[in-house]
Image (spheres, rainbow, N blue to C red):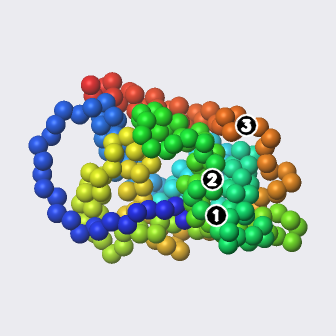
Amino acid sequence: MPYIQKNNPSVNITPTVPSVKSSASIQSTGISVIASKVIPGVINLGKKFVTKFTEKSSGLPLPVRGVINDLSGIKRPLTTKDLDPFLKDAYFRAYNTASQRQGNTPESGTIKYGDYSVGRSESGGSFGSQLELLNNPGYQARYTTGLASYKKNPDGTINISDTFDFNDAGKNMTSAEKKIAINKDLKNIPETAIKDRARVYMRYFGSGEGEGAPVSFNINPGTDELNVPLSKRTYNNVWVKMAKWGANLYKNLTD
C-alpha cells in the first residue's frame, strides 16, 4: 500500500498574517486549490467517464490512475494489463532486489520501498523537477504498490500483490474536520513536495486499509527486464508536460 505517515487530525488552526509568496509557494497553492476542488468532483463523476481515466490507454501515470480509480469509488482491480514494458521492467527489478534480501527467497517475500529503482533523489528540487519524477517508471511503481507481497507462480512468472489503499485514511470525520486537518498537515510539508502534499488529501479522502482496489501484477523474469540503462527507461508523458505548463501559467497569472 502507498505509505502515509500518520498524523493527529485533532488540531486547532490559528490564523496567520499572509506573507509574500515565492514562485514555488504560488504554484503549490494552485495545486492545493485545484486538488480541493477536483477531488470532490472526481468522487461524483459518472463511472463510465471516469473509468476511461483509470485505463492504460489514458496515458496517465499509473499512480494517478490508481488515485482516480480509488476516489471515484470504482476500485476496479489493477492487473498486468495496466502495465507497459517500462513498468513491467520496474517491477521485475524491484522483485529481483527484494528476492536477494535476507528473509526473502526467489519464491516469495516482501517488496519494500527501497527495492524500487528510481535512480535519483525524490526530495528537494524545483516544482518542475518534482513533476518530472512521474516520468520515472520506478517512481510510479513505488507509489502504486509500495510495500507489496510477491510469490512465484507455477509457470515461473512472479505475482506481485497489494491493495491500493491508504493506511491512515481519515474515518468518522466530517468535511469540516477533514478540511482543518488537511490545512494543518500541509503547513508541515515543503511547498515543492508535490507528492507529499497530494497524499495529504488522499489520507482523508482515500480508501482505508484493506478497502481499496486489489492489485495483482504478473511479471515474467525471462522477458520483462529491459536491457537498457536507467536513463533510457523514462517516459516523455504528455500529462506531465501539461501539468508543468499549467503550473507555469498559474505562476505567470498570479505574479
Q: Quadrant of residue 134?
A: top right
Q: Are marks 1 and 2 in contact (CB under 8 Å)?
A: yes
Q: CA distance from mark 1 to mark 3?
A: 22 Å
Residue wearing tag 2: 116
Q: Where, quadrant-wise, is the C terminus in this rendering?
A: top left
Q: Position of residue 153 (x, y in %)?
A: 82, 70
Mark 2 secondary-structure assignment: loop
Observer-nearest of 21 and 60: 21
Residue wearing tag 1: 111
> Can you say whether 127 is above or below 189 in the image?
above
Q: CA distance from mark 2 to mark 3?
A: 15 Å
Task: Classify residue 3 as left or right of residue 9.
Answer: right
Residue wearing tag 3: 229
Q: Are marks 1 and 3 in contact (CB under 8 Å)?
A: no
Q: Residues within 10 Å of mark 3 (few under 14, many from 20)?
A: few
Observer-nearest of 208 and 57: 208
